[in-house]
Amino acid sequence: MTKNHILVIHHGALGDVVSTFPALLRLKKSYGSIAIICQSSIGQLAEELDIVDKWFPLEAAAFATLYSSHIDPIVKNILLSYRKIILFSRSRPLEKTLLSISENEVYRIPPRPDLGEKIHVTRHILSNIVRERLLEESDKNTRMMLSLSVYSDRRTPQYDPSKIIIHPGSGSRKKCWPISNFVKVASSIDANGKQPEFILGPAEYDLYDILLQSKRLNAKVHKIERLTELTGLLKTGGGFIGNDSGVSHLAAFIGLPTVAVFGPSYPEIWKPMGRAVNVVRPDVDCSPCFETGTVGCEDMECFNGITQEDVLAAFYGLVR
């Protein structure tokens, strides 16, 4: 059997997978081809952005058999057709399963750093790939691997510099700056001659009527259903403002000047990476607590310390 080069398996959501894109690009450059097993919507996105050459739908019933005692023959054939398998997971049992059914090399890499590590997720991934010797010794300089050449401008040539895309959602409501503040930011941007446009995913559809009924808001509101639809819209934008979310990671990677508002999570670990990114987080006594599961404050002091002036200053620091 002629074997392909690298197969990546990633169970994560959008932000986690986008954080692997710099490493996947380096691997693709070194090995020539790469495929991924992940959520279908993310796989389509990765192929559209030319990160991978092929993708397989993680949610397909056949792949669920990886967690059973009887692996689907189709899945076995897919695994056996690749020389190297990179598993982004903390699951040792899944790693053992892959080793038991495949004669190929299997590398398990934690998809994010441990809580005690203050290392950016992209550097964490790259350093683990280098440690596993999946990249040449000359590639140990992660600064080079994270150079701006990886973060090229992937927008359409006809993008609108005046279109500023705002996403007020996140994977968790605890990481969302109040919607009223986003409305104030959009109103100010509009008054300054730019065109704010809101995007809402299914998890934020409840904000649709709130935005439409806001008397101070003059902005389009898009209800997005598919990641490919989202990508097409982001590629036409002149800037982006959002929370600590997968969409913010994607916007920054595509090349939009991006402002990300952080509350109870670590910018040192999760700051979006791109050509031009600013993070807004106040200097408060409490430490980011979202990932430890200890969020207990009712008034969210970390968000209360962020004003629309702070976000606008960060935005205009990137977009003139």
Image: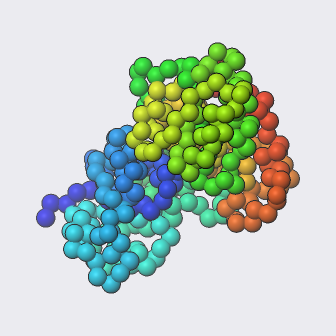
List the single residue furthest toward the left.
Answer: 1
Judging depth in this view, the residue of 48 and 203 nearest the camera is 203
**Figure check: 207 above or below 67:** above
List the single residue furthest toward the bottom.
Answer: 69
Query: Residue 130: percent from the left, percent from the top?
Result: 45, 56
Query: Residue 218: percent from the left, percent from the top?
Result: 64, 24
Image quadrant holding the C terminus, namely top right
Q: Residue at point 46% right, 27% down?
A: 236
Q: Is residue 78 left or right of residue 242?
A: left
Q: Is residue 177 left or right of residue 92?
A: right
Query: Residue 114: percent from the left, percent from the top?
Result: 62, 64
Q: How is the image coloured?
A: rainbow
Judging depth in this view, the residue of 157 and 274 nearest the camera is 157
Q: Is residue 39 left or right of residue 213?
A: left
Q: Residue at point 78% right, 46% down?
A: 303
Judging depth in this view, the residue of 81 and 289 nearest the camera is 289
Q: Is residue 38 visible?
A: yes
Image quadrant holding the N terminus, namely bottom left
Q: Is residue 9 left or right of residue 271?
A: left
**Figure check: 91 above or below 60:** below
**Figure check: 186 above or below 73:** above
Q: Residue at point 39% right, 50% down?
A: 41
Judging depth in this view, the residue of 201 and 241 nearest the camera is 201
Q: Is residue 138 visible?
A: no
Quarter of the view holding residue 94: bottom left
List the single residue furthest toward the right.
Answer: 285
Query: Residue 204: percent from the left, percent from the top?
Result: 59, 47
Across the whole image, how many numbered discs are drawn on residues?
0
Q: Residue at point 51% right, 64% down?
A: 110
